[in-house]
Amino acid sequence: MKLSEIRTPHERFHVHTEQKFAALALHARQIINGKMTVPLQLAGAFGAAFLAGAINSVAGGGTLVSFPILVALGLPPIIANATNTVGIWPGSLGSMWGFREELRRVNRRMFWLLVPAVIGGLVGAVLLRVTPPGVFTALVPWLILFATLLFMIQGPVQKRLRSVEAAEHAGAKWMAVAIGAELAVAIYGGYFGAGMSIMSLSVLGLIGMTDILEMSVMTSTLACAINGIAGLLFAVAGLVSWPIALAMTTGALFGGYGAAGFARKIGKVAVRRFVIIVGLTIAVVMLVKLAF
């Protein structure tokens, strides 16, 4: 039915909305099947994942850079989110390998957090799967803004957590609190992901971890579990653009391992400032776009 054949504004609005979502669904299917993938998109996806992998290996917050780039490349937000989750997942593996010595030093009891990580990642992925595209699109700028604000307060939060003796956080009570908190983090991570590592850092601080390198590699391990189970569900649900995801996989591996040294050289402060500026800019631009 054509809009010109509809008389009432109410009917015109609903038909226009249905047509818009039908076009969005067709666009998403074409992207997923690789019919609209061009070399420029693949190159952009590789670069986005490389940058995200490098940032995640040192400061966290890489998704704040890679996800908006995928949206800018033409992917619908839900497809971009699912593809980003699958694409940057190997970056966690690269980071774990790059910091394997620190991973060996991590207290074995910390690995109990992998249980809520897997469960929460699955729940979050299911929530994304059932969220209408229009609702998620409206939520995206707020999610990015929320993740950026978390990233901004990470330093003070960690300083506060480390100001308390680790022994005070070593008991079963704090471990139970940490498991519950990590479950909530994983649900958020399976749904969106940006800022997830920052939350996990705070959880690790709750149970007495103080070595920042050990904390970083442990957050990579948790992210690997969360994104792994969420990515598996996204793949089964047909939400992943595989040509772009494969380009991102290569970029994330090189970024997570190879670029970690470069990121260290320019300094953690510089990396953090870059991520904050990108996150705030993108959130504001997307909010303005929604408003108009």
Image (spheres, grey):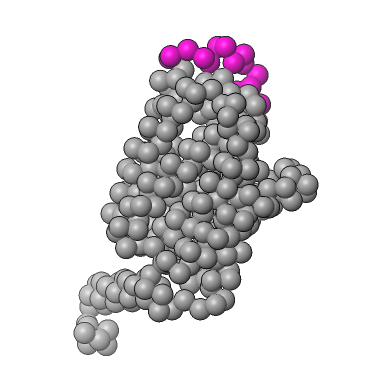
In the drawing, does residue 12 fall left or right of residue 186?
left
Examine the structure image and report whether residue 171 is included in the region drawn in magenta: yes
The residue at the point 43 percent across, 47 percent down is 227
Quadrant of residue 8 within the rendered picture: bottom left
| Percent position of residue 49, x then y | 57, 59
The foreground one among 5 and 156 is 156
Whether residue 215 is visible: no
> Residue 82, relative to residue 230: is it above or below?
below
Can the viewer see residue 33 in this picture?
yes
User: Is 179 above or below relative to 27?
Assistant: above
On the image, the x and y values in percent for residue 150 come to: 56, 40
Q: Which residues are magenta?
A: 159-173
Quarter the N terminus occupies: bottom left
Residue 26 rendering spot, x and y as whole percentages: 33, 75
Q: Is residue 129 left or right of residue 282?
A: left
The answer to whether 221 appears left or right of 139 in the picture is: right
Quadrant in the rendering for residue 226: top left
| Residue at image point 54% right, 22% down | 107
Q: Quadrant of residue 235?
A: bottom left
Please state which of residues 179 and 153 is positioned toward the viewer in this rendering: 179
Q: Main secondary structure of the magenta part?
A: helix
Task: Residue at 53% x, 46% y: name it.
Answer: 93
At horizontal 58% and vertical 69% (from top left) the residue drawn is 44
Q: Position of residue 86 (x, y in %)?
A: 44, 55
